Image (cartoon, rainbow, N blue to C red):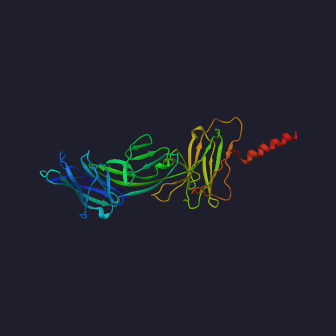
Amino acid sequence: MKPIALLVLSVVTAGYKVSSRVKGCRGGWLEFICQYPSPQARYDRIDLQLPNHLKISISQKDAWEPNGSVWLYHNTSARALRVALRQLQSDSSGEYECKFHPRSKRTEENEREVEVEVADCLTTFEQTAYRSAPTTITCSPPEGRKFFCKDKESICKEIVLNGTHTNTHPNLQLSISDVSSSDAGVYWCGLESGLSRASITRTQLQVEDVTTVTESPAAGQTLTYWLSYPDGLPIKKFLCKGADPSSCQPLVSTAQPKQSSRFTISDKKEQRNLTVTLRQVAPDDSGTYWCGAQSTDARRSDRFLHRLQLTVGPPAPTGPSVICSEPPAPTGPSESDGDFWSALIIVATVCVPVTVIVFVLLYKRKIT
């Protein structure tokens, strides 16, 4: 669904009332701020009247106070009432009134009216990240000031950019390096305008383990390895290169097996085994490779099965030209710790033709 302009803030002053209008997405959240009508005044009580005429009085200061899907924060330093509407629904639309009751009877009561409109504009996505690998969360909001935040105790805490998170415009990409279990959760992408902000994209991030193998062939050698996969995966499997699986560069797939002359991937569906071959590797081939299954659901990320850390050394003066890994046992994948993957046993060994040559040489030596 295409995003829409979410925040339209127009201020009209009419006596003691100030009106504004904001928009949010159904299933998302929306925040707006009612500033003190008079910065110098003191207020005994602040109420929020909902569209159904129910009135909520805030009793705490400088702390979030929940009232169902409505959260209030009386910010005394900013001299304002912060209102958060969670899980927006159709009945969230309507007029909200912030009512300020001053201590002094000489000061009139003041109201700030906010008209809320809820539309079907929320984009949702389920993304899987892998422990110790980087991942990137992306959203493409319309023009405006964009931000990322993460759910924490029913409030979306804005992410402070540091060494592990980067914010890239205009696509708004949030990169997380060295993913751990603490990175799992719900991330929101949103727009901010004036005294309001609203979510437009919801990403549920899951963190899983992935089998990782390290290989160090010499330049010019060919590397072949096998891996098993669980039942129920999408048909199209692929090989890509890059540290971040969410943005790695595709090299070859089972749908286009002749896409590359040096990289091949074949799928034995009956045994649920993949065979991956990297021919005549060069130093530039060093890096991280991922085997994955392409998602058929636009709301879900691809599923990755295996990570290969490849370091290509200088050409070997002698030795095998082909390096093979041991194929998985014919019994198929086993289940461990809730994961369907069988442990991949990678053994650096020579392939059958090279082994035969070695035996022939030993046999001749024995005869002489």
Task: Determine which quarter of the picture holds residue 201.
Answer: bottom left
Give the quarter of the figure containing the C terminus: top right
> Which residue extends farthest left?
106
Residue sitting at x 62%, y 60%: 269
Residue 93 can be seen, yes or no:
yes
Return the x and y of residue 27 as percentages of the image width and height.
Answer: 36, 60
Q: Nearer the viewer, residue 65 or 348?
A: 65
Q: Nearer the viewer, residue 64 or 284?
A: 64
Q: Nearer the viewer, residue 207 or 219?
A: 207
Return the x and y of residue 242 as percentages of the image width and height.
Answer: 52, 44
> Which residue extends farthest right?
368
In the image, is residue 256 above or below residue 40? below
Residue sitting at x 30%, y 60%: 118
Residue 6 can be seen, yes or no:
no
Q: Is residue 210 left or right of residue 170?
A: right
Q: Is residue 172 left or right of residue 94?
A: right
Q: Nearer the viewer, residue 357 or 137?
A: 137
Return the x and y of residue 107 as percentages of the image width and height.
Answer: 13, 51
In the image, is residue 313 above or below residue 89? above
Task: Determine which quarter of the picture holds residue 237.
Answer: bottom right
Return the x and y of residue 139 as percentages of the image width and height.
Answer: 40, 51
Q: Is residue 287 left or right of residue 79?
A: right
Give the quarter of the figure containing the N terminus: bottom left
Number of numbered discs overlaid on the protein picture:
0
